[in-house]
Amino acid sequence: MEKILLKIIKYGVCLSLFTPLVISPDFFFPYVGPKSIYFLALAQIVFFSYLILAVKNSKYRPKLNILLIALSCLLLVLILSSVFGVDFQKSFWSKYERMTGLLMWFHLFAFFIVLSSVFKKKADWLLFFGVSVFGAVIAGIIALFALSGVELIGSSSRSGATLGNSSFLGAYLLFNFFFAVYLFFETNKEKIKNKFNKAFNFYALLSIGMISLSLYFSTARAALISTIGGAVLIFLLWLVFTRKNALKYIGIVFLSVGIIGAVAAVFLTVFSTDMVEKKFIDKFGSSSMKPRFEVARMSIEGLKERPLLGWGMGNFGLTFTKHFNPKFFTEEFGNDIWYDKAHNIVFDTLNSSGVLGFLAYLFVFAAVFWILWKNFLKKKIGFWAASIFSVVLVSYFIQNLTVFDMVSSYLMLSLVLGFVGSACNKETDDSYKKGNWQIPIILILFIACFISFVIQPLRADRSVIKAVSATPFSEERLSLYKKTLELSPIGSDQIKEFFADSSLSYLEKYIKESSELSEELKDDVEKRIKKEIDFISSQLEESVERVPLNFRSSLKLGKIYNDYSMIDKSKVSEAERVLEKAIEVSPNNQQGYWNLAQTYLYQNKINEALLSAQAAVDLEPAVKRGHLILIQVASFTGNVETLREKINQALSINEEWATDITSVL
């Protein structure tokens, strides 16, 4: 049984390393959901096989060490921050667009336990890194072909290949570049006598070239720069720790300067955002960078409100809307008005888990460095292992100042941590065996977990696409809506909003075409519309009631009621109620005022609509959309002077808006 279980675990780990290549257009967020569920499935198979192994033989049980303590502390803080956060459901389950909640962290932790406790031979790790690098080479080739207009895999992203985003691809390739470097030096330093070792060494060298090429042609500039910087850092460490002449001192000087410069750059980026923005971003940056600095400020504001444990994992979107800056609707800020991540590992961690979470996160890095260099100085591991796996974490951290983690980068991080943890768990002979009474319990737990955390989420993910593809306002569609939300809580709020958007688009189409229908047909269609919209609105009401700070669901609910009032006049008062609360939640967000202005128009409250539209303009006069809405509302007043005043007000800010103003009038 031990041999069988070890094979299951080893093959399971190897298969999991192909997670970044998984993609399917049949699922909601095809680049994320299928990958994450694929990894969850394999992680469970591997972990529960390991539990049986550990029960039967004590030598496979984890040994207490500083890295295990650090990761346990981090997991504990994440649990506490989620429990005491704003939305535990989102913190635990996350959503199909991200899949990085507590559920994923439990699986990553279990994966680490298995890697660090079972695999203690270098040959195993060379195999794992070799498999991982092979997957990265495939992803890189797909990306290169996609850039030239050739899709090797259907629906793969042009810039991000099977990962859907160039930044995620860059992070994945970054890890594997250093894995390939490690493979090269580990196979090169020994006397290569057989053809297999020679081939493996050549494979590593070829992989370095292919991954480098893919990184260079990708748009993941942060990952590319971090990788180059990491390579330079390894060279400097080589000078310091392996040379004994003047080169050693040259290495010390450059290494010291580099460390001071890197720390200063990180400090300025994280703690002096105003100065960096004024000195560099305003002069040389793009519109995509300005909102990042504003998001950083919002993170700090959120941290002030919840300093110890933060808002809970996955809840940055609530911080963003609460502290929304009206400038996000301007061209200067790129018109990107929704952020659910801070796009910076420091601010993301501080916001989600507070100061305690950030310290626990740093503790993990410190534990890795301690283990690697302690073992190197004791000559238990070689220079290349100590330097490469230290540097890969430094490079990963630096590039994460511009992006956030997904399952692919988390998987690579787990592989690194597992390798380092295995250095603390050398093979021993002092093992003892126990009975088999625990095995049925483990199997029952496995079945329950697999159904709850793999099968049901997978069914729900696929059901989302089926639901929105069904005939509008049909019994089948409504049934699929209900079934999807019952299958799994993952991303339920986002799915409800997605369903709302789909139903709204068909409702607006019906409103435009309803005049052409007979009264009898209209009655039949409206009965079916009401059933579907009533269900959607009740689900959104539940989301808002559960998390009152959920501005996005409140806004969507207000839009639903606004359009719904076209066939049921009583709903317009519901729209007013919901949108007024939405404005209380996010008082600086123009969307609440714009939708409330529409509600007032439906109630024939022209002056109130004008005041609401004007309030949105007053928040940020540079927003063109705000002026266009205000001018539209002013046209309903019938007052030519008021209309002329609003037009002149807009043109005084930007004369180029004249064409758009003519269009809306």
Image: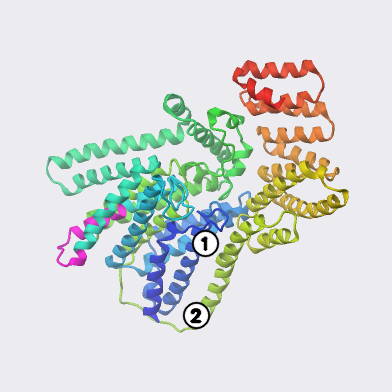
Q: Amino acid at mark 1?
A: Ile
Q: Position of residue 582 (x, y in %)?
A: 71, 39
The residue at the point 73 percent across, 36 percent down is 595
Query: Quick check: 101 above or below 595?
Result: below
Q: Nearer the viewer, mark 2 or mark 1?
A: 1
Q: Position of residue 491 (x, y in %)?
A: 61, 54
Disc 1: CA contacts within 10 A as few (<14), some (14-19) or many (>=20):
many
Q: Position of residue 115 (x, y in %)?
A: 38, 65
Q: Amino acid at mark 2?
A: Ile
Q: Which residue is mark 2?
A: 439
Q: Which residue is mark 1?
A: 37
Query: Quick check: 485 above or below 617?
Result: below
Query: Quick check: 368 above or below 220?
Result: below
Give whichever of 309, 13 is nearer the camera: 13
Q: Position of residue 648 (x, y in %)?
A: 68, 16
Q: Tell me, yes or no, if residue 564 can be seen here.
A: no
Q: CA distance from mark 2 to mark 1?
A: 25 Å
Report which quarter residue 120 is drawn in: bottom left
Helix, strand or loop for disc 2: helix
Give whichever of 310, 224 is nearer the camera: 224
- Segment tinted magenta in the rendering: 178-197
The residue lying furthest to the left in this view is 245
Q: In the picture, which quadrant includes the N terminus? A: bottom left
Q: In the picture, which quadrant includes the C terminus? A: top right
Helix, strand or loop for disc 1: helix
Q: Is residue 192 magenta?
A: yes
Q: Is residue 184 magenta?
A: yes
